[in-house]
């Protein structure tokens, strides 16, 4: 008779968190009291808002998609930026008053 071992490995169905070096930009964002839900953690919709805050800050500051001085002077934009994919893997809850580092890859 032969013995068989289980073919399942110790890997989770969830991907492992990426290392900070996998990201090209970080934005520190202070959570707000209104971000918390009745369970004292951040509602999922607020996570998405944080992601888009970091993405658009990156596009404005680093990619120079929006030239604020040109807009104020009536010159408009120099380029248009797009976020073609965003997603979240939730590893632990967060909430007020935490300071988060939101990364853009």
Image: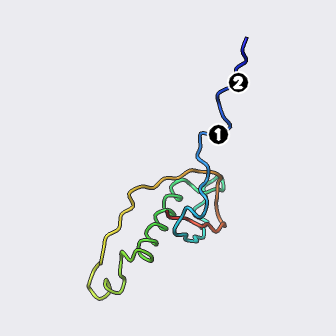
Question: At which x and y percent is residue 21?
Answer: 59, 64
Do the residues under discs 2 and 1 have CB atoms within 8 angstroms?
A: no
Q: Residue visible at 52% across and 69% down?
A: 25
Label 1: how many residues lie within 10 Å, few (<14), some (14-19) or many (20+)? few
Query: Which is more N-terminal, label 1 or label 2?
Result: 2
Pick the quarter of the image with the N terminus: top right
Residue 5 is labelled as 2
Give left or right: position of 51 versus 1: left
Question: Which numbered disc, 2 or 1, marks the residue closer to the eye?
Answer: 2
Give left or right: position of 45 versus 63: right
Give left or right: position of 5 versus 103: right
Q: Residue visible at 40% across and 74% down?
A: 63
In the depicted view, which residue is nearer to us: 73 or 55?
55
Label 2: how many residues lie within 10 Å, few (<14), some (14-19) or many (20+)? few
Indicate whether 78 appears above or below 4.
below
Q: Secondary structure at mark 1?
A: loop
Question: At which x and y percent is residue 5?
Answer: 70, 24
Q: Secondary structure at mark 2?
A: loop
- Extreme residue in the left direction: 75
Give left or right: position of 67 versus 87: left
Question: At which x and y percent is residue 55?
Answer: 45, 66
**Residue designated by label 1:** 11
Q: Residue visible at 53% across and 52% down?
A: 88
CA separation in Å, label 2 and label 1: 16 Å
Question: At which x and y percent is residue 12?
Answer: 63, 40
The colour mode here is: rainbow
């Amino acid at each position: 008779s032969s013995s068989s071992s289980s073919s399942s490995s110790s890997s989770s169905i969830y991907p492992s968190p990426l290392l900070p070096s996998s990201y090209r930009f970080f934005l520190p964002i202070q959570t707000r009291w209104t971000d918390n839900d009745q369970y004292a953690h951040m509602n999922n919709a607020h996570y998405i808002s944080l992601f888009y805050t970091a993405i658009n800050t990156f596009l404005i500051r680093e990619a120079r998609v929006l030239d604020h001085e040109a807009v104020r002077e009536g010159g408009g934009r120099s380029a248009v930026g797009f976020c073609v994919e965003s997603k979240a893997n939730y590893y632990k809850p967060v909430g007020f008053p935490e300071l988060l580092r939101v990364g853009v890859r």
